[in-house]
Amino acid sequence: MISNFTLSGWGAYRPTAILTSAELDARHGCEAGWTASEFGIAARPIANAQETTSAMAAQAARRALDRAGWGDDLPDVIIGGCGVMEQPIPSTATLVQDKLGLGRSGIPCFDVNQTCLSFVAALDMAAMGIALGRWRRALVFASDIASAGLNPDNPKTRSIFGDGAAAVAIEACSDQRRGLRSIASVTHGAHGALAQLRSGGTRLRIEEGYEALVAGSYFEMDAFGIFKAAAKALPGVIDQALGQAGVERDDLDCIICHQASAPGVEHVKRLFEPRDERVVDIFANTGNQIAASIPTTLAHALDTGAAKAGDTILILGTAAGISATAAVLQL
């Protein structure tokens, strides 16, 4: 289903505290330059106690709404696309609505979760609602605090994940050239154990003991296994999305990909050679921000002019599951 909308506003929030690779070297007990060389990280933002998931999301959402210039015209829906919710109940979107001063507005709010692809899934949901005429304006956000679930004894996950939030404000339009042109997605649940966070739901319970809950609260990842599974899934969804949109690879002006890891972004660049400069790469200074990664990269591209009105862009990513998605968006 083609959904015609304009991206009226966008915004991102970057936590105030920055953890540098030099500081990570010291924490890991490694020689200077080891973290940067091993993981491609220069620095990553870390949320403080006041920068909760919903607080960061509200900041990003406010910036998107201000840029959209909707004034007193409220969005018809608020959709959260966080990889990890602030708390199981209520939805993070509900918390964000209240922090925006809209807690009595009645605007419907809900969350969509596909781990690192949650923002793309939420944007797709908003686009479908607009295409069906259910909504005219939608606010979509992603916000994640990856640092909350990092095992201090695992240098890989401790180094590559960062915190942040981003949001977009979209509204229906009559221009048939603009909006979501296509989306393709696959999930291979057989690889579900390659990346998981076991605590926070009903799998681990209080009666299993404190140590079990703590152990399950640390993010677990088979980095090499994820890379192999993701690399295998990406070409298919790219070809499918481009084919559905009637777009050739050379027609793409910009590629917004999930900043999963330095090797992950480099792999995406290889897929778009020889014009790999179209792939936006901000990993070194953000790290993997889970679901906030893709909208943060999109906001960066729009702020810097790497993506602009009229451009054809590809949004591309993978997630725990293992899932892969590609979407063609006409700005």
Image (cartoon, rainbow, N blue to C red):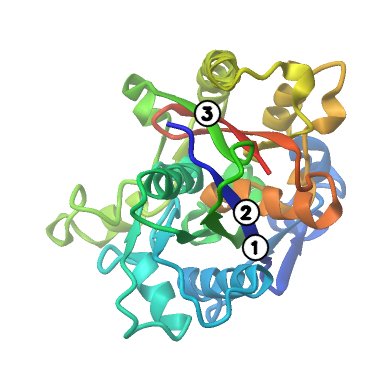
Q: CA distance from mark 2 to mark 1?
A: 6 Å
Q: Residues within 10 Å of mark 2 (few under 14, many from 20)?
A: many
Residue position for label 3: 182
In front: 170, or 92? 170
**Earlier-in-chain disc, 2 versus 3:** 2
Residue drawn where x is 35% and y is 83% of the image? 103
Q: Which mark is residue 89?
A: none
Position above or below: 266 against 259: above
Labels 1 & 3 near each other (Cβ < 8 A): no
Mark 1, secondary structure of its residue? strand
Q: Is residue 201 left or right of residue 285?
A: left
Front residue (pair 294, 180): 180
Q: Are marks 2 and 1 in contact (CB under 8 Å)?
A: yes
Crowd rating for badge 1 (residues with CA inside 10 Å; few <14, some 14–19, many 20+): many
Disc 2 target residue: 7
Name the residue type under label 1: Gly
Q: Amino acid at mark 2?
A: Leu
Mark on residue 9? 1
Q: Callout 3, which amino acid?
A: Ser
**280 over 224 or under it: above or below:** below
Residue 301 appears left or right of 46: right
Q: Position of residue 123 (x, y in %)?
A: 48, 47
Q: Give the x, y percent position of residue 246.
A: 62, 17
Q: Is residue 153 visible?
A: no
In the image, 27 versus 270, the foreground residue is 270
Q: Quadrant of the N terminus?
A: top left
Q: Residue furthest left?
A: 207
